[in-house]
Each structure stands twice: as structure tokens, then as C-alpha cells.
Image (cartoon, rainbow, N blue to C red):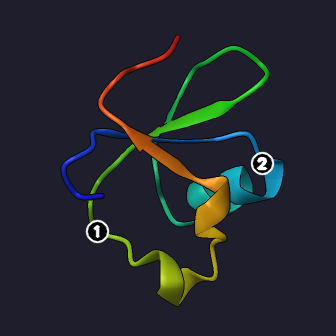
């Protein structure tokens, strides 16, 4: 979803994978994790479960 500005997930493992890949985490409430979408990653190549990731243009804080 290259047109979306943010990525979010509720999954802690996916969060750790995104951090490892260099995504910038936006501080959010404790029940979910949000990152700035840099549009550079192919999720299939990095073994990230796309069903646990959502894309949005709305920043939830």
C-alpha cells in the first residue's frame, strides 16, 4: 500500500520485525503499534504476515 502514510499492527512480533527493518515507530497507546510507511519494503520478501498489518493515512495517537 504505497499510497498510505502509516502502517499499524497489534502484533508484538510484527512490531519487532518492523523495528529490525528500520521502520520508525510512532508513539501510540499501549494496545497497538504504528510506524511511518517508507514504501520501500516488500513484505513477502521479509516474512512478515501481511494479515497482521494494516495501512492507513490516519494517524492514531
Label 2, secondary structure: give it: loop
Horizontal arrangement in the rendering, residue 43 relative to residue 18 (left or right)? left
Label 1, secondary structure: give it: loop
Name the residue: 35% across, 22% down: 58
- Pointer 2 residue: 11
Q: Nearer the viewer, mark 1 or mark 2?
A: 2
Asked if one can make out residue 20 in the rendered structure from this viewpoint, the answer is: no
In the rendered image, the residue lying farthest to the left is 3
Horizontal arrangement in the rendering, residue 60 relative to residue 29 (left or right)? left
Horizontal arrangement in the rendering, residue 28 relative to residue 57 (left or right)? right
Labels 1 and 2 touching (C-beta < 8 A): no
Name the residue: 64% across, 62% down: 51
Label 1 to label 2: alpha-carbon separation: 21 Å
Asked if one can make out residue 32 in the rendered structure from this viewpoint, the answer is: yes
Name the residue: 80% across, 58% down: 13
- In this view, the residue in front, 52 or 27, is 52
Q: Position of residue 37 (x, y in %)?
A: 34, 48
Crowd around label 2: few <14 · some 14–19 · many ≥20 (10 Å): some
In the rendered image, the residue lying farthest to the front is 51
Q: Position of residue 61 (x, y in %)?
A: 53, 10
Crowd around label 1: few <14 · some 14–19 · many ≥20 (10 Å): few
Q: Quadrant of residue 28?
A: top right
- Marker disc for residue 8: none
Q: Quadrant of residue 14?
A: bottom right
N-terminal of the two: label 1 or label 2? 2
- Pointer 1 residue: 40
As displayed, is residue 47 above or below residue 12? below
Amino acid at each position: 500500500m504505497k499510497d498510505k502514510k502509516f502502517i499499524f499492527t497489534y502484533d508484538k512480533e510484527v512490531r519487532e520485525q518492523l523495528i529490525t527493518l528500520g521502520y520508525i515507530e510512532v508513539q501510540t497507546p499501549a494496545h497497538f503499534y504504528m510506524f511511518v510507511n517508507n514504501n520501500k519494503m516488500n513484505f513477502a520478501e521479509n516474512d512478515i504476515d501481511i494479515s497482521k498489518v494494516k495501512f492507513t493515512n490516519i494517524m492514531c495517537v
